Image (spheres, rainbow, N blue to C red):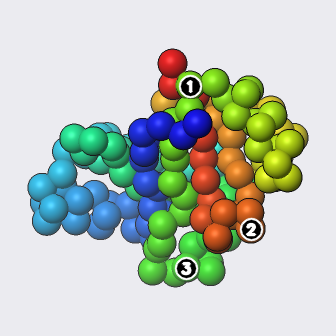
Amino acid sequence: MIGRLNHVAIAVPDLDAAVIKYRDLLGGEVSKPQDLPEHGVRVVFVKLENSSIELLYPLGENSPIAGFLQKNPNGAIHHICFEVNDLAKAISRLVEEGARVIGDGTPKIGAHGLPIIFLHPRDFDGVLIELEEVK
Ligand code: CO
C-alpha cells in the first residue's frame, strides 16, 4: 500500500537558522518560505534526490506546531509522509483494521496540493504518519 517516502517534516524553533543549516552547512536545495494558513505552518522545502525535507514553523494562533515546539523546544521530527495511490482505499483498509485517522476521516489538501490524511501516532509507535495521494 505505501509507496515512496514523500517527505520527513521537522518542526524548527528558528526557520531562518534552519534554512542556513540546510542550505549552507548541508548544501541542500531549499525553497522560499511558503505560508500555509489552513495548516497553521510556514514551510520551507529541502529538495533531495529521492525525497524531501519540510521545515515547519508555526503560523497563526492555532498552529499545531506551536504546541509541539513547546514540548520539543529544540525542534524535532514532526511526521513522516508516505505516498499511496488510492487514499480512499487506504483509509477504509486502515479504519477496518482499527487504526485511527486524525480529524473527521476525510482527506484535506496538503502542502503539495494533493489529498492527505494523518494517522494517530499511538497506532504507529509514536510516529505521526501522513499519507499523500500521488497518482
Ligand atoms: Co507533511
Sooner in the amino-acid sequence: mark 3 or mark 2: 3
Residue located 66% across and 56% down the image: 63
In which quadrant of the rendered view does residue 127 lie? Answer: bottom right
Q: Is residue 54 left or right of residue 63?
A: left
- Identity, as a three-letter code, of the amino acid under mark 2: Arg
Please tell me whether mark 1 sits on a helix, a strand or a loop.
Answer: loop
Image quarter for residue 55?
A: bottom left
Q: Is 96 located above or below residue 27 in the figure?
A: above
Residue to which mark 2 is pinned = 122
* Cβ at disc 2 under 8 Å from ligand 1: no
In the image, residue 37 lies at what x, y percent?
62, 40
- Which mark sits nearer the N-terminus, 2 or 1? 1
- Dot 2, crowdedness within 10 Å: few (<14), some or many (≥20)? few
Can residue 14 be seen in this snapshot? yes
Q: Nearer the viewer, residue 120 or 16?
A: 120
Q: Quadrant of the N terminus?
A: top right
The answer to whether the residue bearing label 1 lies less than 8 angstroms from the nearest atom of ligand 1 is no
Decide: is 107 above or below 100: above
Q: How far across and down, in percent of the image, does residue 51 sit? A: 33, 43
Please give the name of the residue rendered at 68% of the width and 47% of the height, measured from the top-left corner: 118
Residue tagged by mark 3? 72
Question: Label 1 belongs to which residue?
Answer: 85
Tell me the crowding category of disc 1: few under 14, some 14 to 19, or many 20 or more residues within 10 angstroms, Cα based. some
Discs 3/2, front: 2
Please provide percent x and percent y for residue 130: 60, 47
